[in-house]
Amino acid sequence: MLASYKLFWKNYFNYKGTASKKEFWWPCFVNLILWVVVIYAFSAMARKAPSAAAAMTWRVAAAVILAILSLGTLSCSVRRLRDGGYPWYYLFIMLIPVFGVFIMLAYLVADQGANCKKKGHKWVWHKERCQNVCANCGMTQELHDFDGCTCRVCGKRRDSNHRFTQYDRAKCLETCEICGKTQPRHDWNHCVCKVCGQKRDSNHDFKRLPGVCREKCSVCGKERGAAHMFDANGVCTVCGFKDPKPFTLKDMTQNELDALRFACDIMGKLDSLSWENRNTYKRLSGSLGNNTKLDAGDLALVAVAASQVGQALSSDKNVTNFSNNNNNINTLLMRLHLVNLIGATNKIKTMLDNLGKVKAAEEKKAFVKKPLSAFPSYDESYKGYVKGGVCDVCNQPLDGVKAYAVDNKTFYDSPEYFEHLKAFQKKVFGLELTREEYENRRKMDTSPGSAVCENCIHLFADMAGVVSTDAAGEKKYYEASNLGSRHDTCDKAMGYWLGERPNKAVKPPFTLFTMPTQESGEEALLELPFFHRASDTGKIICDRIMTYGVYEVTENKKPTGTYEALVCGSDLSQAEFEAAEAALEKHGGKRKNALKPEGEVKPVLVENGNPELVKFKENLTRGDSTYVVHTAPTKADALAFLQKKTVKTLSRYLVVDTPEGNLGRDINGIYEE
């Protein structure tokens, strides 16, 4: 609007140009407002004037302002008519009584060249501008005589049809001989220029890396993930990655799929099921297809639905009840569903049997650490003993150090040693150790075994319950001896406070302190008799059933520089509670929260338990979580059993039910339910 009004005053005396609809109607709108303001304001001033001469002055001033606005509107109207292709004298149409104003409005709202579109333009050639200009409406046409990118007549340029004839190979630039414009011209070898070395993120020459599901560009070295090559069991044959949803119903017929969706829909409406299972069944009823990917939990739920609904349909009474509840499903359709459910159930049973066989084979092949007593001492009595040798793991001299002989199969089967060697090679040489290279190393090793020092034997031996001494005669502890649940991150701690602790019927006593540093919190814990530093990992471990840890507090997953230390356990005595608070306060801590123990308690000690008394009970699946449930006579028996077990999967739980209460073990350690 402002731009149009500026043009109104700029072209005040211009009767030869053109004005678009916007350039005409915006000024008319503003001038109309000014007319109303001037008439009313100046009339009011004239009425209040002290004399007739003063009143006349106000009226004359108003007339002058209105005349200025009118003359500008007149020239703008002439330009508006010319823009539509109409001659200026059409303004006299306004003299026609009543209808003249309306006819003129029709001309003033016409588009550019509206009259010329009907009668034809009257073009006038302007050679210096290479333009045809309509003498009636002012519309223009550009008719250039281009030589490549530049007009021969007016010199106007366009960004096309350049003549790039001059090439500077050293700079990878070519220049237009007409206008001088430059543009890059590279000699690409896939993604890298052969001349200047510039890179582009396209046309890479990706080749698959051996032993991993990744691809690497042979030219620039860029890496990206590659598709896994899954076998029938959902395990990648290259990197060993397990598909979280390896099952599909591709062998099912369409009728069997319809029957399974029907069964899941029925199960999703049963009030006897949990809310979680009902929602899962509703999801499955709407998504089951030949290519739908399912995990083991979903497949088991589908099998349960097919079995239970099939059993219900096999009874004539139940078929009648179904028919009565839903008039759209008749008895014949029920029988057809029953036949299809029987076929689908058999196929799912075969899939689950195969899954069980695969898991059994994996457990049989899984590396199990031997007890430390199974490894002979590496000394003169060992047939492969070499005096002055070094540890085959850390390369430290073995003279004067307790060492063990590890057979080659155990040595190379250990996944912990593979990860150790992989990290070492990456750190020292900057190279990624592949499984194929590792297996070649195994084949080339023809020695009778490997020498491993006492600081590295934990990679191969089960150190649970093992207590050794260092050179100073002090006891040494190992990560496998940890009986507590360690919270060394804020996320783990929040999971305990918000998820695990609220579900406990009896809240165990605890003390929570804010600490100045990580080191101060760990030093405070080490002053308590049941906390130790593991020789193999360097982390704090606990020889009692405790929830403990030192961690940095985070906000929105960003570190805050504030640390917290936690000591929590149901068998925490009053004296131990006070000792923990004293140690934390001694090292600069400030109590944040606490729950004091009530009465005296007797701690559960692992040495009082017998793991042989623990018996398997059942396997439970809840969503994505798997619970392996056992029973034991006492908590001590359960603790001794769980101490020798490890959990490396986030959603796997070992649970032991006892009359004294339940104990469990997850990826974080041992916990009390």
Image (cartoon, rainbow, N blue to C red):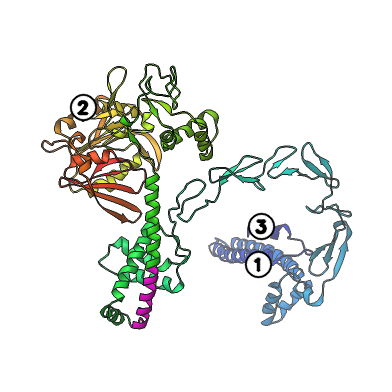
- Residue at disc 3, secondary structure: helix
Q: Quadrant of residue 451?
A: top left
List the residue tagged with mark 1.
Answer: 25
- Whichever of labels 2 and 3 marks the residue nearer the N terminus, that label is 3
Q: Are marks 2 and 3 in contact (CB under 8 Å)?
A: no
Q: Is residue 250 left or right of residue 139?
A: left
User: Mark 1 or 2, which is nearer the eye?
Assistant: 2
Label 2 to label 3: alpha-carbon separation: 78 Å
Give the x, y percent position of residue 617: 24, 52
Q: Amino acid at mark 1?
A: Trp
Of residues 554 and 531, the one drawn nearer to the viewer in this rendering: 531
Look at the image and give the residue range highlighted in magenta.
Answer: 327-344
Residue 582: numbered disc: 2
User: Mark 2 or 3, which is nearer the eye?
Assistant: 2
- Whichever of labels 1 and 2 marks the residue nearer the N terminus, that label is 1
Q: Is residue 331 above or below residue 641?
A: below
Q: Quadrant of residue 297?
A: bottom left
Residue 3: numbered disc: 3
Give the x, y percent position of residue 179: 83, 47
Q: Is residue 187 left or right of residue 659?
A: right
